Amino acid sequence: MIYLKSFKLSPHTVNNPNAYPYNVFRKITGEVLVFHNITVVYGNNGSGKSTLLNLMANKLKITGAEEITNNSHNIYPLDYISECSYALGENKSDGESDQLPYNTLYIKSEDILYEIKKIQQEAVLKEGYLYQHSRLGYTKERLEELKHSSQMYKQMKIMKFSNEKYSNGETSMQIFDEHLVPNGLYLLDEPETSLSPTNQIKLAEEINKLARFFDCQFIIATHSPFMLGTLDAKIYNLDAPLLTTNRWTELENVRFFYDFFNKRKNEFE
């Protein structure tokens, strides 16, 4: 399903070479990205791939967007966002949609790391425990009693042990499993963070399945060769002089891995 058809970057430039984010996208000013069911924005550190996803999230007012700021040039970010434009899908019979779905979310690598830390904090476990009991129909009075009961603290110990026995990568996979549901548009910034190569591939395979069978669309910023080699994706290369698409095997980061292991091939034989 195509919910977001295209996104056009601001066609304008400014005199100040350090004005953010004009300086980040100076090589691709006014370019249009056309999206598939899965689209990858590839680039090394500093290429602007994360900035691009956050810019799109701001323009579309997607949950998870962070305000774009520049302390010395506050006026430019707001101008830049207003100068960008986008097009939604139009024809539902062609597998497109004329509106963003309810399940539209921008998930950053920082969000995952924050969630991992958060679930290990006692206050959050306590809040979650009381919330679950409120969902079971507990009155305010019963919840207040529960808040100070030995029963709750006993359950808290069990919950803390359960959370701590999982690695960061396992917790990340659980978070993605919870948030990536059918009929959704998802912007994912470096989802490979904390994941082993095996889990990176598992996540990429799940994304392929959600896009193919469950009406999901993904726009993903990554430079992981395992994600790039597994995703059935259109790949934009932000390291190139112009906005271009490439096969995953042509990308610099992937070639680096290939050369690294190829030079050490005899050590595996």
Image (cartoon, helix red, strand yellow):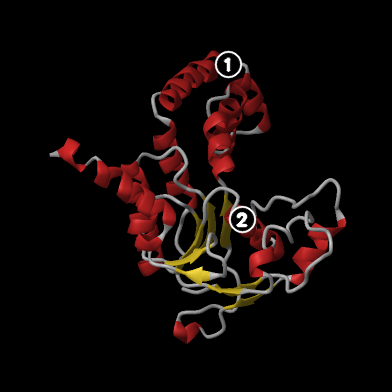
Which mark sits nearer the N-terminus, 2 or 1? 2
- In this rendering, the label closer to the viewer, 2 or 1: 2
Mark 2, residues whose alpha carbon is within 10 Å: few (<14), some, or many (≥20)? many
Res. 203 in view? no
Res. 56 in view? yes
The residues tagged by marks 2 and 1 sit, at their Cα atoms, a distance apart of: 51 Å
Callout 2 secondary element: loop
Quarter residue 168 falls in: top left
Q: Which quadrant is home to the C terminus?
A: top left
Mark 1, residues whose alpha carbon is within 10 Å: few (<14), some, or many (≥20)? few
In the shown orientation, is residue 15 left or right of residue 156? Answer: right
Residue 245 is situated, as x and y percent measured from the top left of the image, at: 47, 70
In the shown orientation, is residue 34 left or right of residue 216? Answer: right
Q: According to the image, label 1 marks what residue? A: 149
> Which residue is outermost to the top?
150
Q: Which mark is residue 76?
A: none
39 is higher (above) or lower (below) than 69: below
Q: According to the image, label 2 marks what residue? A: 48
91 is higher (above) or lower (below) than 59: below
Task: Tell me what residue is drawn at x 58 percent, y 63 percent.
Answer: 102
Residue 42 is situated, as x and y percent measured from the top left of the image, at: 49, 58
Task: Tell me what residue is drawn at x 44 percent, y 23 percent.
Answer: 164
